[in-house]
Amino acid sequence: MASEEDLVSTRDIFIRIKQHKWPILAFICGVVLTLVIAVPLMVSKSSFSEKDEKTDYAFLLRFDRKSTHSLLFLSDDNRVISNSFSEETPNAVNNPEQFNTYKGTIGDKYLTSTSKIYFEIKFSYEILSSFIDNSTNLVAEVGVISRKEIDNHFFAGTIGWSFIIHNCFSYICLTAWHIMSKTKEQIKVMSLGNTAGTVATGRLGFFVNMNRNEFSIIDKDTSKILYTLKKVVFADQLCLAFGIYNPKLLEAKLEMMYSYDFTSLPIINVIV
């Protein structure tokens, strides 16, 4: 038989629960929401890790060899493009279909009106000769542009949508660029110097969502969307553009790390 002390203790517990029922319910709801939302999100994030190359959505996105400008070099597997000859990029291109004006190449997959493509690029550059501080010398770019128009322009942002690494006064920056909509917004500093010997490397993610006509860039250091270019619409076939510039001033390289095609998924944005 329970003692009087036990009965008092039990009664006190019920009284306290009744007094604090709303905070307790809030805590329980918080735990449930955490299990429902946070855990699936953690799983989805891990499913997009670099090690998960064998998912149903992984696909091979490579640089298009036949379109590559004659001043650039490719790796044997078309995953790396550079403005300098090296053991990694030993292949100069000589093809009647290669670009003459645009200092770059395109991706080997065209975009459709429903494309939802995510890919990651590793960039690196070393400045060989100091930039003039007030110049806008280009280093590299990743863009979306009309396949028909690309070789009429020096860089994709002239008529398309582009994220460009270039000289910004006394440092190197990343800028979102679309001249047609007067978009020219600096979004990140890539290196604090622009003098000979400056070296930088990093990774950037890109998400093209043609359902929403958007082109986003993701900072892989913070997993945050840095900027989204909107109204990505053109009458002609659109393609991905990759430019590398100024071989006399710097050695630069773009490497395709991995890519996913989420076209079949009913998502409106990418989880990084």
Image (cartoon, rainbow, N blue to C red):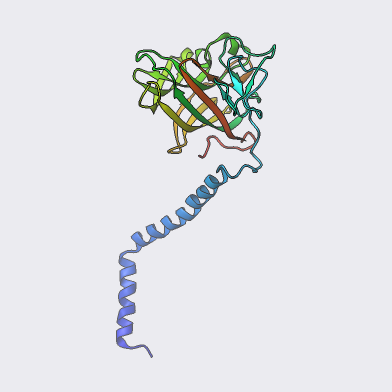
**Label tally:** 0
The location of residue 138, given as percent across then percent down, is 46, 17
Q: Tell whether 66 sits left or right of 164.
A: right
**Is 235 located above or below residue 213 in the figure?**
above
Q: Which residue sits furthest right?
A: 96
Snapshot quadrant of residue 209: top right
Q: Position of residue 13 (x, y in %)?
A: 33, 74
Q: Residue at x 55, y 25 (%)?
A: 213
In this view, 163 is above or below 202:
above
Q: Which residue of the protein is positioned furthest toward the bottom in this rendering?
A: 1
Query: Measuring 32% from the left and 77% from the top, which residue is drawn there?
Result: 11
Nearer-the-camera pick, 61 or 139? 139
Residue 15 horizontal/vertical position (percent): 31, 71
Name above or below for residue 35 compared with residue 78: below
Foreground of the two, 131 or 32: 131
Q: Nearer the viewer, residue 72 or 33?
A: 72
Residue 92 at what x, y percent from top left? 63, 19
In the image as oriented, which residue stretches furthest toward the front? 87
To which quarter of the image does residue 199 belong? top left
Q: Quadrant of the N terminus?
A: bottom left
Q: Name the residue: 36% across, 24% down.
A: 193
